[in-house]
Amino acid sequence: MWLRYPMRKGAGNYLLRGNFSNRKLDTLSNWYDTEKHYVEIIRQDDPVQPGIGMALGFEFDADNDTFPFTPSYAFLQLKNFAWGGVEFSPRDTLNYSGVTNEVSNDLTIEILQFSNDTITGRFSGLLLSGGGPMAPVTEGRFCARLYRR
């Protein structure tokens, strides 16, 4: 599955409630909080009317120069927009998510490189659904230009 598009405005698309410009949606789709040392990347299969979307978030410090880097906190949520549900929320029981923190170890994320505000990495793990089913992720990769905020 290749989720290469950020969120975009469009007639009848899923994300209308914020009425954000495409420029703002670019920032919301791949940002780096320099104070909290946190990255979030959102990608979907279609820019305007997505069927599948993914949100990936993890701790990261741009001053780190040792790669690969494995964050101790990370999350991933895979969303099927046809199912509806709460948009990228822990209350969403229809879609799949995984978390790595001091309690759970569902995901492995490795940051391979960070250069010129572009971050690349890979991930794998086991995603869980609030409804019970599980879905393995054997190999995922990402590369995104981050907007600092």
Image: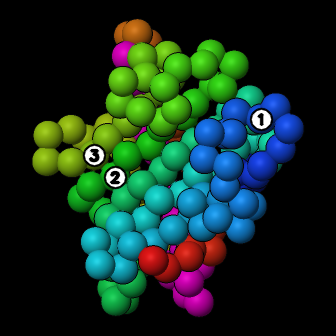
Mark 1 or mark 2, earlier in chain: 1
Q: Residue at x 21, y 38 (%)?
A: 104
Q: Main secondary structure of the magenta part?
A: strand
Q: Residue at x 38, y 10 (%)?
A: 132
Would you say 132 lies left or right of 48 here? left
* Discs 3/1, front: 1
**Image quadrant in which the N terminus is located:** top right
Would you say 132 lies left or right of 29 here? left
Mark 3 or mark 2, earlier in chain: 2
Q: Indicate the amino acid at tag 1.
A: Asn
- The answer to whether residue 34 is above or below residue 10 is below
Residue 101 belongs to magenta span: no
Residue 118 belongs to magenta span: yes
Q: Which residue is drawn at 28% across and 71% down?
A: 36
Q: CB atoms at circles 3 and 2 under 8 Å apart? A: yes
- Residue 69: name its quadrant: bottom left
Q: Which residue lies furthest to the left in this view?
A: 102
**Numbered badge on residue 13:** 1
Q: What element carries label 3?
A: strand
Q: Mark 2 points at which residue?
A: 74
Q: Mark 3 points at which residue?
A: 100
**Magenta-tinted stretch:** 113-130
* Discs 1/2, front: 1
Q: Residues within 10 Å of mark 2 (few under 14, many from 20)?
A: many
